[in-house]
Amino acid sequence: MQSVSVLITLKQVFLFIFVLMLQKLAIKNYAIIDQLVLEPDAHLNTVTGETGAGKSIILGALSLILGERADTSVLINKSEKCIVEAFFDVSGNSGFKAVLQKEDIDESDQCIIRREINSNGKSRAFINDTPVTLNTLNRITGLLIDLHQQFDHLELENDHFQMDVVDAIGQNNALKSTYATLYHQYKKTSLELADKQQQLAQWQKEADYKKFLLDELLQSDLKENEIEDAGQQLKQMAHAERIIGVLQGAHNVLDGGEQPLINELKRVSQQLQTITDVAPDAALINERILSVWAELKDISEELELLEGKVLLDTDLMQQIQEKLDKGYKLLKKHGLQTTNDLIALQQQLEKELRSTLDLTEAIATLTKEQGALYLQLIEDGKRLSAKRNSTAPQIAAKVNELLTLVGMPNATFAIVLKPLPQPGPNGIDSIQFLLDANKSGHMLPVQKAASGGEMSRIMLCIKSLTAKAMHLPTLIFDEVDTGISGEAARQVGILLRNLATYHQVVCITHQPQVAAKGTTHFYVYKDTDGSARITTKVRVLKQEERVLAIARMIGGEQPSEAAMQNARELVTV
């Protein structure tokens, strides 16, 4: 089974004011588990059993809940699917429910996570009956379960977690929150400033050419529809003689020549007027003729005016032609169609030119604002750094005391804080947890200096120190006591018991001193159920059963009375 690591930062954890607790784990058709139900209590749950009984198999099933890849080889009965379900109490936890809402997952006081594996290899995951991807499953279950296994040290490698430990114990949350808010403002201002500077740089690259284009348009001094009007005017001037001839001919017909039409209509009207007294209907016709006469008279006058507007000025034609040529050249150059398009381009270039002035002013304002934020950020960062540097040696000293108790007397643990070249999201320091496991005189990063079992114990020591200060999910330790016995094992048990005062803890152990500290003791065993097939089962031990199980861990399958007495003392302590 691959190592499973769940990373959770203090920022995430502080979203959850109430304890997140695993209420039930149900496993069906997984490896040699036919059907199994585990219901841990809210404190320290110890899990024991003979080697090979199936304790690691239970963790393997749990890893499916955490988003591990599925393998059909885990199916006992190929005709049925494997199902692993975990039930969590999240009542009153608005922070966790908000995470579910963000993922469009139904929320309630109980969160049910289910993983199904079919015999064809297909795997499905559900949160509150809503299908989810493995990435989503991993992200959300990381807020519910913190699993520590052999060689599982990614959390200790994570500098965010390391800094969270120092800040939690040093009670730096208010300072850290203030710094984080200021850092966000500083980064936002810096990004805005960089964007404005980039815009200005881009404009400056094209400034000369755009200025040339603008000057060219300004010199043209174009008016609305000017090119189109000039084209029409030039076309009219080119046909001026023909236009004048037509207009004059029309005018002569109406009001010129020997017998103008207007005069003839006037004469007809006068004649009709003489008979209106004897032919009354003629009066109506006469009125219509007079109306036509007036209209034709008006048309004749307009023809005369229109004729006067037609120009035959060759110099003016040349000027219009030159302006028209310039206009057409500009339209072709810019790929535009009309005068108004050129005017719009001119306005755009003028706007961009003005924007450079606005950009320059904005850059000056943002630069000043960024500088002020930076100074404040450094000031707040120094206060946070001072508290961290004051707290770190105290934490290291306490961890070293605990390491001695849990069987690592030769180990030296240290926390090193170094200034960053620039302020970061967590402050002005970098952090590293260092360890010298065997008094070699060489301090190395913890993950390089410690073995798997040592890493688990170091993590236990650290989390026991942060138990009151940090809200953590369900903590599961897999054989954290490997390689120790006697007093060291007893101290591990005490640490686990103290940690379980504040958090739900599940610990798989082979040490009687640890097993005896559990508030609930689960025993994992193999059973044939009267058939040839062996299956893994688990049950909660009663007081006397528990004494016997611990006595067997001390003295073998047939424990002596001394072992039984020792077991009773361990359980009652």
Image (cartoon, helix red, strand yellow):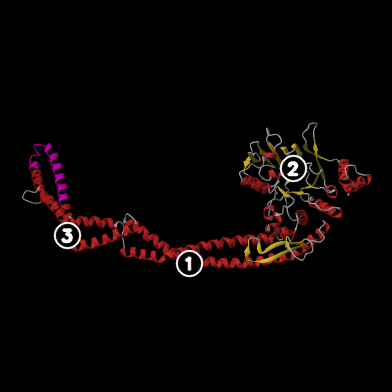
- The x and y percentages for residue 260 are 9, 49
**Disc 1 target residue:** 360
Q: Based on the displayed image, in which of its 4 quarters is residue 398 positioned?
A: bottom right
Residue in front for this viewpoint, 129 or 369? 129
Quick check: marks 3 and 2 in contact, CB under 8 Å?
no
Residue 89 in sight from this viewpoint: no
Q: Locate residue 491, reporting x and y percent.
A: 84, 54
- Quickly name the residue at label 2: 57
Q: Secondary structure at mark 2?
A: helix
Residue on which the image places disc 3: 312
Mark 3 and mark 1 in contact? Answer it, CB < 8 Å. no
- Nearest to the observer: residue 1 or residue 257: 1
Check disc 3: other Cα within 10 Å, few if <14, some if 14-19, many if 20+.
Answer: some
Compute the Cα span from label 1 to label 2: 66 Å
Please identify the dominant SS of the magenta region. helix
Query: Considering only order in the chain, which callout, 1 or 3, is on the residue closer to the N terminus?
Result: 3
Q: Nearer the viewer, mark 1 or mark 2?
A: 2
